[in-house]
Amino acid sequence: MRQPHCVKEVTPARRGSLGSALTFLCCLLLASAARPKGPGHNYLNSIRIDGDISLGGLFPVHARGSEGKPCGELKKEKGIHRLEAMLFALDRINNDHELLPNITLGARILDTCSRDTHALEQSLTFVQALIERDGSDVKCPGGGPPVVSKPERVVGVIGASASSVSIMVANILRLFKIPQVSYASTAPELSDNSRYDFFSRVVPPDTYQAQAMLDIVKALGWNYVSTVASEGNYGESGVDAFIQKSREEGERFPPCPPCPPRNL
């Protein structure tokens, strides 16, 4: 059963700036750090800011959980700092009356917990407003029609961080033609516009990193290379891109059997 989520709402009348959202974020961090994380612990993983136009946000505020828990420890630099950057950008845009006159940007920001399956479940929040609900089989006690609360509609999603998470979310968002812009996903397969036609990113794919690594190897005259990669699309695809680039340029490195993955 899906656990209930705590949602912080910031209305335009209270916003002025996004200080109240940042205050809530600080309280979220303190509560998460001080509260015991038992089996039934519910993580506070959603922030909602009302506006004329809403943007979705996906950030790894927590690390991947263990022992059946969806979320683990807090991630400051790759999670909290990036979330604050989005709040800061919204604040600057909303306070600039020449950039978007008479329009206020809102947001619905969710925590992916650094897990692709958890992010997929969270991202369903972004498409709820686009799914028609049939209430014809629902009968109210007074005979009137049922009252269905319609969630806000997002015009685009910022995120996610890990390539595996962005790939999982992109497969859902493209069905509803919701644009997605990632700030950190670098997997080469995300460059396939036939599969990820509503996905874009502000960082280059791993192929550029692979080319830079190959240039260093050639410049130093190395003939033996050992790679260490993280498990997942980022690390494994990066090594594959390096091997492919080396073959394209005529470099031949004898393949070595991969070591079994382990936690470092």
Image (cartoon, rainbow, N blue to C red):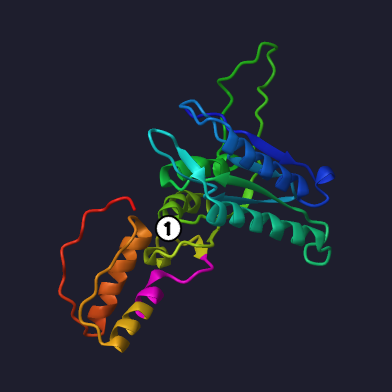
Q: What is the span of residues highlighted in magenta in the rendered image? A: 201-211
Q: Camera-side residue: 5 or 134?
A: 5
Residue drawn where x is 50% and y is 43% of the image: 73
Q: What residue is shown at x 37% (from left), y 64% (from top)?
A: 189
Residue 38 screen position, x and y as percent: 48, 27
Vertical order, 136 against 262 (above or below):
above
Residue 238 seen by the camera: yes
> Is-magenta flag for residue 205?
yes
Find residue 39 and report its horizontal and vertical position in percent: 45, 27
Left or right relative to 219: residue 39: right
Q: Is residue 44 visible?
A: no
* Foreground pick, 162 / 193: 162
Front residue of 57 and 72: 72
Q: Which residue is mark 1?
A: 163
Q: Secondary structure at mark 1?
A: helix
Q: Residue 77, located in which quarter of the rendered image? A: bottom right
Location of residue 236 (image quadrant): bottom left
**In the rendered image, which quarter is residue 125 located in?**
top right
Is residue 83 positioned above or below 134 on the image?
A: below
Residue at (81% x, 59% y) in the render: 95
Q: Is residue 17 left or right of residue 172?
A: right
Q: Is residue 92 magenta?
A: no
Crowding at label 1, few (<14), some or many (≥20) Cα neighbours within 10 Å?
Answer: many
Q: Measured from the top left, where is residue 101 in percent x and y?
A: 82, 61
For badge 1, the amino acid type reads Ser
Image coordinates of residue 83 in percent, x first then y, are: 61, 53
For residue 114, side relative to residue 227 (left or right)? right
